[in-house]
Every structure is written in C-alpha cells, then in structure tokens.
Image (cartoon, grey):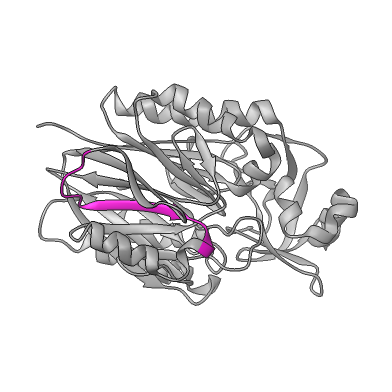
Amino acid sequence: MRSEQISWNEGSGWISRSGDVGLANLVFYFGTRQALASGARYRELRSKYPGARLLGCSTGGQIRNDDVTDDDIAGLALRFDRTGLRLATATVAGPLGSRACGETIGRTLAQTNDDELSAIFVLSDGLSVNGSELVAGITAVVGNGVALTGGMAGDGALFQETLVGGDGPPRTHQVAAVGFYGNAVRIAHGSAGGWDEFGPRRRITRAQGNVLYELDGKPALDLYKRYLGDEADGLPGTALLFPLRICDPEYPDNEVVRTVLAVDHDARSMTFAGDMPEGWVAQLMRGNLDRIAIGAADAARQAAADIGGRDGVAILVSCIGRRLLMGQRVTEEVEAAGAELGRGMPRLGFYSYGEIAPHRAMGECQLHNQTMTVTVISETDL
C-alpha cells in the first residue's frame, strides 16, 4: 500500500504534500462545510483521481499529521495492491431511519462474490442520524467480526448542516462507507477519552431514542442550564463542555459518553448523538486538558499495538467538544497520538460530532462521544 498526502486551499488549489501513490484507488478528504458545499472540490478530486473511491465529509477542523487547520481541505490518497474496495451510500431522512440506513449500507458491502469483507470505514451526517442505531444496523448485517470504525460529520460549533460525500458531491442526510476485502488488509483501532466525572449520578427516567427528556424525573435541559449558568445562551455548543457518561447499571464498566447535538427549549429536552436508554445511569463530565492529551495517546497506543509495527496510515477522529475545550492547545492531543504511532506514519483526520469504533471493554462497535478514535490501515506484502 502506498500513500500520498494532499491538501487544498483558496490560494494554491490542490497540492501533493508527500508520497507517490501512482494510480490511487481510495481517497479520504475532510474540510469545512463552506469549502465542500459547492461540489467543485469533489469534481477536482474526481479529475485528479479518476479511478479512485472518494470518501469525505465536513468537519469541525482538519487533522494533518501534527497540525489542526480550519481553512483548507486535508486529504490522503491510497493505492492498495491486494485489497478489494467497494463504496456504499444511503440517504437518511432523520434519526428514526438510522437503523434501516445502516442495514442498507451493511447489505451493500456484504454482497460480494469476491474476497470476504474484512473492515468498514463509515462517515455519517452528523445532525440527522442516531449514530447508535446506524452502527447497530450495520453490525446486524455484517456481524461483529468485521472491524467497523468511522465518524459523524461536523460543522464546527455551528450545528447547522453537515455534509458527506461518497463518489459524489458532498450533501446532507447522507451516509457513506468503504468496505475493505481480502486477507491482505490490516485494520487496527483504539479509542479513549480523558474526561472526569463530577456531580451526582442520575437515572434516565424519560427518553426516546437519542432524545433525553428527564433525569431523575426532572427536565434534562434544566439540569444543563443550571450548570452552564450564563453560558446557557450558547446551547447546544456550550453543552459540549459537559458531556454525559452513561452506563447500564447492570454492567457499569461498559460505559459510553454522549454529547449534545440540539436542544428543544419548549420541550426542555436534549438530542444526543446516540441512544439514551431509559433506566441507565448518567453523570456529567468535564474536561481535563492534560488527561485529554493522555487519552489521545492511549487511543493511538491501542492501535499501534494491534498493527504490530507494520507501515500504514492513520485516520484520527476526535470530538468537536475536545477541540472547543482545548482551544489553542488542541495540537497537544494530535501530537500525543503521533508520538505513539510514529512520526513517519501519515496521519489524517477530523473533529466530529461522534466517533465510531469498537468498545475497548466489550469489543462490540459503538458510537462514542468526546473520544479520540484512531484507525490504522495497512496492507501485508504477501
């Protein structure tokens, strides 16, 4: 497998930063909604890489090696020699259609007369999709034996519109995924957080899907407003600094973190990126800058250990809440991940509204929030 890092900006257009990929057959690209909305950048990529699968999305910031940028588009072109590729797309109207959308993606990628499906990398609309249900739909079809990683598109801290492109101009309400086939491809992954719990544990007493109405019988939005104080006017963006850790009380170690996507002031409810099951225990969290960087290093360490020293490329998906909290120190987490992966490994990624990766304790793929997720892709010589 060969790789070539590419980027686009208003002044220079598309430039190749490193590598010689030859005839690429897969290109990842990440950029701002404003940069991707017209479809012109997609058409330029299609002309530059006519035979490649093109997969990308809008973001809350692009990661390229040790840098985090806002104005350019960051990309990575790959050439696989012994790995089959297939791309699937589906449209989702809203959260209630998320599981069916995932099943459609899964069926499309599972239907092959060639090599066995080994792994999937998926990008999803970040606002109109219940990430938990999307993941459940895909895994219901392909099984937990297929490595599934990816993320939900972002729109900075605006939460207005997100875009996903799969062999077509990026658009809203879209999910796109690439399947990797055969036994030559190697996918390793890691995921970790670094947030601290605070305040009392509360029970989710009323919820529907990814919409949370009540904690301990009281409106969820009221709880957040009390903790945010004067910053409550900035909802939902300011709620990113106070995610919820949730867990099944029967399995307290199998915890996940949920972050807010939208609020309904009339219903006093909050919409999260994934399911908020009734009866589960929830606890507020807040960030610790040093621990967040340590969490990024931990995620990269997990992936590096699984890849066994092979050359490859890394796709980093980190939550927009982490970036907002870290501010100008945000490069500390990508540098920490890079130190574990090795400076020679090309790294591309984005800040997201949700991260998709197997749960470290359970092994099953889940939607995460407020994590750094690392996917390392490589190909064997034999």
Frontmost residue, 207 versus 113: 113
Left or right of 335 on screen, residue 2: left
Measured as percent of width and height from the top left, residue 223 is found at 84, 55
Quarter of the figure that contains the N terminus: top left
Measured as percent of width and height from the top left, residue 180 is found at 23, 50
Q: Is residue 87 above or below residue 143?
A: below
Q: Is residue 83 magenta?
A: no
Q: Is residue 175 above or below residue 320?
A: below
Left or right of 97 on screen, residue 49: left
Frontmost residue, 175 versus 36: 36
Measured as percent of width and height from the top left, residue 178 is found at 29, 56
Q: Is residue 30 magenta?
A: yes
Q: Quick check: can you spot residue 219? A: no
Left or right of 221 on screen, residue 336: left
Frontmost residue, 283 versus 38: 38
Left or right of 31 on screen, residue 155: right
Q: Quick check: can you spot residue 295? A: yes
Q: Residue furthest bottom?
A: 93
Measured as percent of width and height from the top left, residue 288 is found at 71, 31
**Rendered residue at 20%/52% (across/down):** 25
Q: Is residue 277 above or below residue 357?
A: below
Range of residues picked out in magenta: 20-34
Q: Residue furthest front?
A: 11
Q: Quadrant of residue 378?
A: top left
Count of picture labels: 0
**Rendered residue at 37%/69% (across/down):** 169
Quarter of the figure that contains the C terminus: top left
**Rendered residue at 73%/41% (across/down):** 285
Q: Quadrant of residue 345?
A: top left
